[in-house]
Image (tube, rainbow, N blue to C red):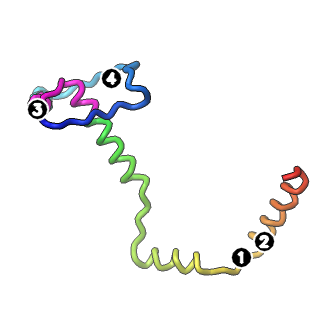
Amino acid sequence: MLAFQTHDLEDGKKRVRMEQRISSEAKELIEIAARLQGIPLSEFVVANSVMAARETISKLRMTVLQPQDAEAFMLALADTEPCEALVDLLALHKGVTASHGR
């Protein structure tokens, strides 16, 4: 049996059920992979689905800038002079928080 890590979420208790229809060829491939790892089919499907979901979320939440955009972003961060609207907003924030005893 190969080393295998499960990817239970929360406390590991199974509370909900998922069902999907797949082709017989896809099911056969998944069964072979589960057998090769020496784990039950359902455990293989859940563990690999959770892993794929985490990878997908991570990739899609990542912001990637092209070199020219990255340069513009860094220049904007380096600009130390606040605009008038920001100065007004900070003054408003200071007034509101001061009146609430913060």
Q: Marks 1 and 4, how far apart in space?
A: 52 Å
Marks 2 and 1, Cα distance to the nearest angstrom? 7 Å
Residue carrying label 1: 82
The mark that comes first in sequence, 1 or 4, is 4
- Report helix, strand or loop for mark 2: helix
Q: Nearer the viewer, mark 3 or mark 1?
A: 3
Chain part drawn in magenta: 31-47
C-alpha gap between disc 4 and disc 3: 27 Å
Decide whether residue 32 is among the magenta residues. Answer: yes
Give amino acid for label 2.
Val
Identify the secondary structure beneath mark 1. Answer: loop
Circle 2 residues within 10 Å: few <14, some 14–19, many ≥20: few
Disc 3: which residue: 1
Q: What's the distance in space between the residues labelled 4 and 2, CA to CA?
A: 52 Å
The residue sitting at 78% across, 71% down in the picture is 87
Instruction: Report the residue marked by disc 2.
Output: 87
Answer whether residue 37 is magenta in the image.
yes
Residue drawn at x 46%, y 75% is 69
Graded by Cα atoms within 10 Å as few (under 14), some (14 to 19) or many (20 or more), the crowding at tag 3 reads few
